[in-house]
Image (cartoon, rainbow, N blue to C red):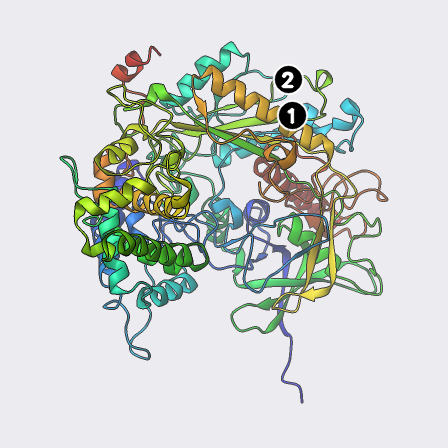
Amino acid sequence: MKRRDYLKNIGLTSLGMAVVGADAEAAALLDKPKAKTKPKGTGELKIPGGRTKEEAIRDVKLMAEKFFSEHEMKTITVLVDIIIPADEKSGSASQAGVPAFIEFMAKDRPDEFQTPLRGGLKWIDIQSIKRFNKQFVEITPKQRIEIVEDIAYPEQAKPQFSQGVAFFSLMRNLTASGFFTSEMGINDLGYVGNRPNQWEGVPEEVLKQYGL
Amino acid sequence: MLDFQVKEQTTIYDVVIVGSGAGGGMAAHELTKAGAKVCVLEAGQPYDPADPKNITQLKWPWESPRRGANTTRPFGDFDAAYGGWEIDGEPYTTARGTQFDWFRSRMVGGRTNHWGRISLRFGPDDFRRKSIDGLGDDWPIGYDDVKPYYDRLDRLVGIFGTVEGLRNEPDGLFLPPPKPRLHELMLQKNNKKLNIPTIPSRLSILTKPINNERGQCFYCSQCSRACQAYADFSSSSVLIKPALKTGNLTLITYAMAREVLTDPATGLATGVSYVNTLDRQEYTVKGKIVILAASAGETARLLLNSKSARFPQGLANSSGVVGRYINDSTGASRSAIIPALFDRKRYNEDGVGGMHVYTPWWLDNKKLDFPRGYHIEYWGGMGMPAYGFGWGIEGINGRFPTRSGIQKAAGGYGASLKDDYRRFYGAYVGMAGRGEPVPLESNYCEIDPKVVDKWGIPVLRFNYKWSDYEIKQAKHMQDTFEQIIHELGAVPLGPKPTAEDNYGLAAPGRIIHEVGTARMGNDPKKSVLNKQCQAHDVKNLFVADAAPFVSQGDKNATWTIMALSMRTSEYIINEVKKKNL
């Protein structure tokens, strides 16, 4: 096959319909986990391209499950937007679908995430009730920041907040991972690869900038 | 009555090959082209990287609900390896106090679908280590015996690189290499001051087209996902596919080999029995010649499981050497961040799948406290974000002042944190040593007396311990990494590994370069195969994977597996012509 032909082919099979279709599909899966799952006995399992049958079965099962309560999801949504808010360049973590990503990861890696996240969410609610007599989602943004300030800086935090610090670091890491692997986050970051191209080396002005 | 029967094929193939990876694929390619009727048994599923069912190339992280995390596949959702270190229902064991992790890919093309495409020839010294340092053994062949096959391989498969004239890093017939990325240029410049050579890498990726069947690299950096343009080497695309086109190849997938069958009277191999992993039925396939290319581990397992009155220790094992001397590459790594690259200009620097430059072994072991060398692989740059992106920023953002010179507290949240991720993107660099271990008789795999897999096949039990040689080598790697990082003006991440953790030396099996379980040699008492990779005990039985390796250099095994498989195939063709087989 000539180079032009296979680039064209790839354009058709992957860059054209497949990627757009799969984006929408993936977004749908994350936003509405239940809509995707057919009741047992109706229809056949649709295996997405690039997945094995066993993986597809597992993914469908995970999508159908719900781990966090509505209250927990609300708390997660508030927290991820404190960690990554909207700014002049891009939207917030929740706008990029990060809460649904965290819900999925908790089901995908239960041993690693379920107890630290569920317990951490409870920890922050207890803090909130002790200080303001209300759960974290019910207090004012200013009051929330008061709590966050105590757990957001691992090297400065007081020892009595160490569990909160560990939870907040985990949330920070999951939020960043979820945000910067979303379409919004990748555009924000300015990653411009993942497409057929011809690599010609480092651009001239960059070589100059670094004296190379 | 028992509802059990072995389904026997009436066809007698000229050659039956177990395994469709680098070695099996090459044997199938060479033998079918020569007109032989060949049957390949593959334990895994069919695989073509251009089949939309399999394609993961050019997918975005958000197309995976776990953003490409490695929950179900060891190298993540988009990696082209169906299998891993753990496979459901296919266990292996390790003897107490020893360690070995065994990676298996269950698919046509095996582990060649996702490998790093690092395609290094062994040099003259790599075949004669005992003569140099008194340890281990020499090969029964030398570089000059293998060179013609390396040359043919370079032309057949395609490889890029540069002619460097380094004595023990033989040059090949190279396509042009891709230009270095920014961090690679920095490494080249600064390593020079340390007298550490840093030369264009040698990868089997087509920077120029070499035929009409395969396309040219389009620089997506995703060879580990397998290429739908067939621009990188995988056995499935480059060897099995053309072999099928000859009409001489019967490829049987989902065929898990159980035993090599032999004629009790002559002691010759007559075929292979296997279980079909879909219908769980037993089958046999007959052949005049049998080639095992199931991987060093699976080949040893097959031989040891093929016991009969005539071969009570397992097939081709009168020496007792089958399974002995198993050895994997050493591996240790370190990463760092380059402040000079903060807030760098964005452009597409995906490049090819893997490093554009590497460091071949450059020192003289006579002046060091360990006997064998290592090469260094590098990574870094503005890659596609994946699961794990930004993880651990609380260990980094308190160490560097912001753009406006403010020293922030580590961790944080909000707009300023969001900006840190942008600032640090593309500033990370990492390096890993891949070194040569000393093959030891005391490192071996054997059949576990108690455990079978879900097909009822007795499994391997590994007995593997690193020796002081490898640990000292890992220490040297860590010291070198620190020098390189320092000279680069970078800041190392995480604490430097120490003696307590073997200097970061990866567990045996983790580098996925295991070789040596059926080594070749001139003495049938000390080796399993002769210098043609033909069993000393069974003249129509051959091995064409990494099991015949006497040692592995610090060179990734694939290129030599294929060169030897080509050489063995040619020997078989000639012997058949001469009616010796």
Q: Are marks 2 and 1 in contact (CB under 8 Å)?
A: yes
Where is residue A183 drawn, in percent x and y? 23, 44
Image coordinates for residue B286, horizontal then vertical, percent: 66, 64
Taking the image as shown, residue B539 lies to the left or right of residue B472, namely: right
Instruction: Report the amino acid beneath label 2.
Output: Leu
- At mark 1, the secondary structure is loop
Residue B107, image x and y in percent? 50, 55
Q: Given the image, what chain letter belongs to the residue carrying mark 1?
A: B
Give the chain letter at badge 2: B
Q: Quadrant of the C terminus of chain A?
A: top left
Q: Which x, y percent locates residue B426?
A: 34, 29
Q: Nearer the viewer, residue B239 or A208?
A: A208
On residue B373, which mark appears?
Answer: 1
Identify residue type, mark 1. Answer: Gly
Of B379 and B518, which appears nearest the observer? Answer: B379
Disc 2 target residue: B363
Q: How far apart in space, not on screen, are marks 2 and 1 (Cα)?
A: 8 Å
Residue B323 relative to residue A46: left or right:
right
Instruction: Name the element at disc 2.
Output: loop
* Quarter in which the N terminus of chain A is drawn: top left
Identify the residue at horizontal 65%, vertical 48% (top origin).
Answer: B100
Picture disc at residue B486: none
Q: Is residue A19 above or below residue B250?
A: above
Q: Earlier in the sequence, mark 2 or mark 1?
A: 2
Residue nearest the observer in this picture, B415 or B572: B415
